[in-house]
Amino acid sequence: MNSAPRTDSTADPMSGFHAATRALAEWGITAHIEEGTREPWLVVARDQSTGTPPGMFEPHALVHLHEGSQARVLVTDAAGVERILITRPLDQLAECAIAIAEWVSDPYPTAGSVLLAALAVHGIAAHTDALGMSYAIPLDPATPAADVYSRAHLSVADRSPEIEHDPAVHTGWTVFQHDENGEPVGDPLYIAGDGEPVDCWVESAIAAAVIADWLTAHRN
């Protein structure tokens, strides 16, 4: 990122939002001022290609001005999971703009994409259902994608319960075996975590290795 664009400190919320909008525009980012029932806020879509405000279930950032002296930026993923990105005094609003710009421009990994990359290391491809609730890995690699969930496979899911959540809130994968009719069999082959966030990259690599070992043993 380049040096921060200048913004003016102000105690007036709307003036503050206009200042934030100008600061974000310096980075080529479009922000939208929304009017709430109690207070206004600034919303920024992670997908900047449309130039329109994001939908409720689209990744976005919200900028709130608290008590006319502090800016707080919250980011929300597609599952509605919200976390604080940055909090700064209004006279440091430019730092909020930089944090949002970096969040928008950086690649947007999800826990699911992290798992897929870990599986790819072992040459394993996975399919997802239409709802994005789990991945399925067929025991027979020749199984048509449309039939994977109704035939023998391994399923991988998370407590979220969806799979395309922010890696920062990942709580661990669970792997089940499914029989020739697609029905689950017995206890999980692999389960991680205790409900608290875990390191998504490390845990996904472990889960992928377990899956790879199991498939090697059962595909031969």
Image (cartoon, rainbow, N blue to C red):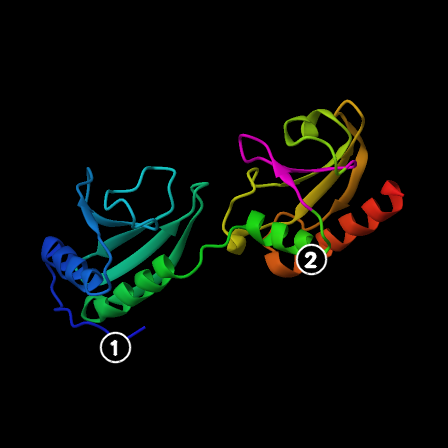
Q: Quadrant of residue 127?
A: top right
> Which residue range is magenta in the image?
125-140
User: Outermost residue toward the front?
Assistant: 142
Q: Amino acid at mark 2?
A: Val
Against 187, residue 100 (above or below) is below
Q: Is residue 197 above or below residue 154?
A: below
Badge 2: residue crowd in 10 Å (few <14, some 14–19, many ≥20) = few
Q: Position of residue 200 (x, y in %)?
A: 60, 56
Residue beneath label 1, please? 3
Seen in the picture, residue 144 relative to 101 is either above or below; the reply is above
Look at label 1 and name its amino acid: Ser
Q: Tag 1's secondary structure? A: loop
User: Residue at the bottom extreme?
Assistant: 3
- Residue 145 placement: quadrant: top right
CA separation in Å, label 2 and label 1: 38 Å
Residue 27 at x, y percent in the picture: 24, 64
Tell me the residue that label 2 is attached to: 121
